[in-house]
Structures are given as structure tokens and as C-alpha cells.
Image (cartoon, helix red, strand yellow):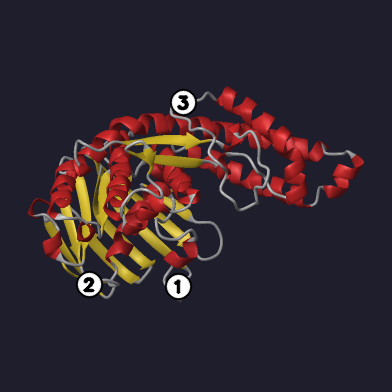
Amino acid sequence: MIVTHLQLVDFRNYRSAEVALRRGPNLIVGRNGQGKTNLVESIGYLATLGSHRVSSDQALVRAGAEAAIVRARLEHGERELLVELQLNRSGANRAQVARAPARPRDLPRHVSTVLFAPEDLLLVRGDPSGRRRMLDQLLVQLSPRMSGVLADYDRVLRQRTTLLKTARAARRTGDLSTLEVWDERLVAFGSEIIAARADLVMRLRPPLAEAYRAIAGEEHSADLALDLSVLLVDVDGATPDAEPPPSGGQREGITASAASAAFRSALERMRPAELERGVTLAGPHRDDLVLELNGRPARGYASHGESWSFALALKLAAAVLLREHSPTGDPVVILDDVFAELDETRRSRLADAVAGYEQVIITAAVEADVPAELAGRVIRIEAGAVVEG
């Protein structure tokens, strides 16, 4: 899949912009703060239904506007397709596919991207929420129906947590039947997410190890495991916002039925603590993706360069899975301001790793930072306008 044309209206700092893109490498050049990242952010949003920079859509709508529009013409082999997303400041977002109304959650069926940006350093050094979001965005691209499952889980989690905060009176009378109803719904959606994430981690491990060796050298190894909060034995001393202790790490898949049994048992075991604290202490919202470098946790041990290499390898592994299993074929590989942080050896190795993808989009403040083989078509950006290309 490639993006042949991108149009933005009232998106970030763009009042209106149109960019033609080509197969192969496309280089977007401009000083910091001019809008390079905003262009690639819009493409990434179509594929993942989320920004890699902010959690709220409000920041994506230009100041003073009520809605932003992202319109992209895609090429799938011999077939062309127009997709459009309207991000509304108030009210639900709207989408079109081939000029026919569609649900926003349908867009990942048609758009596939892997975006690496400086913010991805937090995948290694940040809190678990960023790693969960990365897994879930990849899940949605591989299986778009998971968007609905994740949304349903979040809705039930909010409702259950609200009930926990007001459940002390019910606890005194022994009437917790309403909570038990929400438990079943939480388990139903949550166990599917747990199983899907565990399967994804298992599939990511081989391409991650290969990608890290390609970037950092043969003497290094990288691996993944999934810490599942439903497998925790105890939560004594935990606070609502605390990271759960490790569960030992899930490296292989787990069936939805096994996840359901473990989840149901965890909720029963943790109910006294949950009623006391008014928070749901087990479930996929408290799981973590553990990154291991040379047999040790990357977080806390990896150097700055190793952390960059690990985050890059994660994204390259995601690209491999999408290439193999996504109905759209090759994802668009987006490298946002990446090369300035890499030494010459890693720049060359990264260029080799992405050279075979149908379309690669690179942003850079300094054109010379990008290896010559990825220069390709050059597009220049200045103050929210395409001034050349």
C-alpha cells in the first residue's frame, strides 16, 4: 500500500495543504516547528485511530476551527481508494471510504503504517501505558475488529470503577450482584484482549530479535515478554496508580478461556482491596510489555543509543508482521526525525532495513542527516505550507 496524495484542512498548523507522494522514499525537509511531523501524524492517525503525540483529538484541530479533515488517496496494487476522516472538536468523528459514509474504526482495514518518532524512546524508558498503546494500535491494524473490543473494555472498565467507588454500602449489606454483572462483562472483553496481546508478543519476538541485530550488531539480543496482572498472587501495598509487580512474563500465547479463568480468579481474589480503594486492580489496563536487552530489562539498563535501537527494532518488527499478515500488504514506513539521533553506522543499517518497503516517508530538519539512498522525492515545508515538491 502507498499514499499517493494527502490533503489536510485545518489539521494542526495547516489551514490547507496538499502533498503528492511517490512509491519508494519521500523526504520531507524543514526547520523544527514548521509542520513536518504534522503531515506524517495525519497519515499515522488513519491507520491507528490515534496520534503518536497526544491522547486527545482536540489538539489535532487547528485553533479557531471546529473540525479537521484528513483525506488520502491510496494505491493498493492496481486499485485506488480515497479515504477521509473528519475530526470534530465536539461530537463524534466521521469517516468516508470511496466517498461513502463509513465508521472511523473501519479505516485501519484500508490504511497500514508503521511510524517511528522521537516520542517512541518512551517505549523503552516510559511507563507501561505507552507500551500497551503500541501493542493495541498494532492489534487494530492486524485485526481491525479489535478496535471495538478495546473500546468496549474501556467503557466497561470506567463503569465498573465508578461502581467500586460507591460500593461500600452494598458491601455492608452483602449485595454485590451489580458488581458481579460488570465483572462478567469485564472478563469477556478483557480476556480477548489478553489473549490477542499475548499472541502478538509471541509473533513479534523473532522479527524483533532479527531487527535489533540488524541495527545494533550480531553480538546483541532483544526479547519481549508480557506481564499479566491477572496472574499476580498479591497486590498488598499497591496504589491505584502504581505499576503492578512483574508476573513472571508471558512469552507464549494464552487462550481466551485460560485468560478468562485467570481474570475471574484475580477479580475474586482482589475484590476486598478493590472495594477498599475504589479501583480495578487487574486486567489488560494494568499489564505491561517487558523489553529485555541481552537478558536484562532494557528499562533502567539500556543506554540512550541502545534504547533508540530497541524502539526502532520494535517498529521494524511491527512492519514485518504487517507486511506478512495485513490485507493491505506493505505498510507505509514513516521515520519522523530519526536520523539526527543515530550515528553513521546505525543510519546505514536502518536505511538497509527499510529500503525494501513500497513506500518510506522520512522527515528531517537537516537533509544531509538522511542517507542518500533514502533522499528520493524531496518535499520542503515552511510555516505550515508546502513550498516545494
Q: Tell me where residue 77 appears, x and y as whole percent.
A: 21, 37
Residue under the point 51% across and 66% down? 89
Depth check, front residue: 25 or 349: 349
Q: Earlier in the sequence, mark 2 or mark 1?
A: 2
> Total number of numbered labels?
3
- Which of the two discs, 2 and 1, sits closer to the camera? 2
Which residue in the structure is indicated by mark 2? 31
Q: Disc 2, disc 1: CB below 8 Å?
A: no
- Quadrant in the picture for residue 319: top left
Given the image, on which type of amino acid does mark 1 rest?
A: Ala
Measure the alpha-carbon separation of dots 2 and 1: 25 Å
Name the spot of residue 201 as percent of width and height, x first. 41, 33
Which residue is the extreme one toward the left?
A: 372
Q: Is residue 357 visible?
A: no
Please name the residue shown 27% across and 42% down the image.
Answer: 316
Q: Position of residue 298 (x, y in %)?
A: 37, 45
Residue designated by label 3: 253
Residue linked to disc 1: 65
Could you tell me if residue 133 is visible in this image? yes
| Left or right: residue 146 compared with residue 74 | right
